[in-house]
Image (cartoon, rainbow, N blue to C red):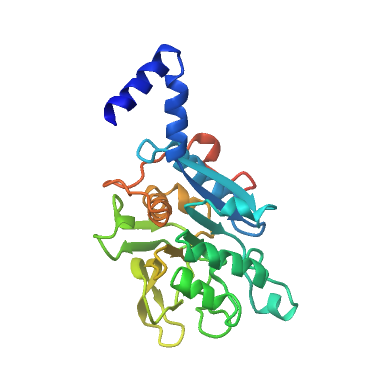
Amino acid sequence: MKVRVRMILAGLALVGLLPVFESYAAGRQSKKIVLLWSKGHHPNKAGCELFKHCLESSPSAKNIKCQVYENWPENPTVLADAAAIVIYSEGINEEMKKQGKPHPVFNSPKRLEYLDKLMKKGVGLVCIHYTLYATRQLEAPKLLDWVGAYYDFEGYGSTHWVTQKPQVLMPVTSYHPVSRGWTKFTLKENELYHNLRFAQENCPVPILKTTFQDKKTKKMKEHIVAWALERKDGGRGFGFGGGHFYNMWINDDCRKMILNAILWTAKIKVPENGVQSSVPRQLKTEKTGQH
């Protein structure tokens, strides 16, 4: 068999088609990441565009192709062959629920059903910031299955706030692939959703933690703000309560964590030192202005 392959390659080289064959073979080995964003008060689009640039240009992450769509692709079958889906969108809150407005991405049982089928096939999922807002009856059960946690705005969630005070975030585990290559970091400005509701069965692995002052007791309490889940269906999920500010992704450690998570959920081996990336000048600030 090896002799036969060598003969074929030799023949292709003679007729000048070897580069085409090699390109085709490399293309077959590439993995697709689909990133979904929605308009709002957060850097959803800019964040997705930055992740796409970093993953496709990283010297340590090969053969990755990213596609970016607003809200939901017109032809949802483009999601069918994705290794992982990243959702960086606006969410739903109490006021929107009263007005009958849906979550901008999980906006119908039909979409949830389609995503659920993909999850059961082993497609990875990354949910960032406001995406994690969910109604208890509709989106919450799915998010618990897919990524292991959600933000329960209907009673359990934290009263989050935007702060200009520096926030120190610390890795919880050192053995998990998502934790490779980065250490604790400080965000100068932040809005981190915490006090999330986590799955009681098949609990996710905590990845990142920080401390917040309890509103009632005034005592400082640790909270998990990023986590990773090995799903029972064989797929993987990751959630992060941050993402309110674009500057979070300019931080090398925070950016490496999320890029590692995308690779891990796509079942791509995370490099020992994490995903190497840089931010070009034109992507240093969000195109639509800083939040």
- The answer to whether residue 268 is above or below residue 204 is above
Asked whether the viewer can see residue 239, the reply is yes
Q: Position of residue 152 (x, y in %)?
A: 53, 79
Which of the pair 252/143 is nearer the observer? 143
- The answer to whether residue 73 is above or below residue 168 is above
Image quadrant occupied by the C terminus: bottom right
Asked whether the viewer can see residue 291, the reply is no
Image quadrant occupied by the N terminus: top left
- The answer to whether residue 94 is above or below residue 233 is below
Q: On the rendered structure, is 200 left or right of 157?
A: left
Point 58% across, 74% down: residue: 139
Q: On the rendered structure, is 219 left or right of 114?
A: left
Q: Quadrant of residue 98?
A: bottom right
Q: Residue furthest left?
A: 175
Q: Residue furthest top?
A: 14
Q: On the rendered structure, is 166 left or right of 49?
A: left
Which of the pair 191/236 is nearer the observer? 236
Q: Position of residue 269 (x, y in %)?
A: 33, 49
Point 50% across, 49% down: residue: 33
Q: Quadrant of residue 12?
A: top left
Q: Position of residue 140 (x, y in %)?
A: 54, 77
Point 60% across, 60% down: residue: 89
Point 45% across, 47% down: residue: 250
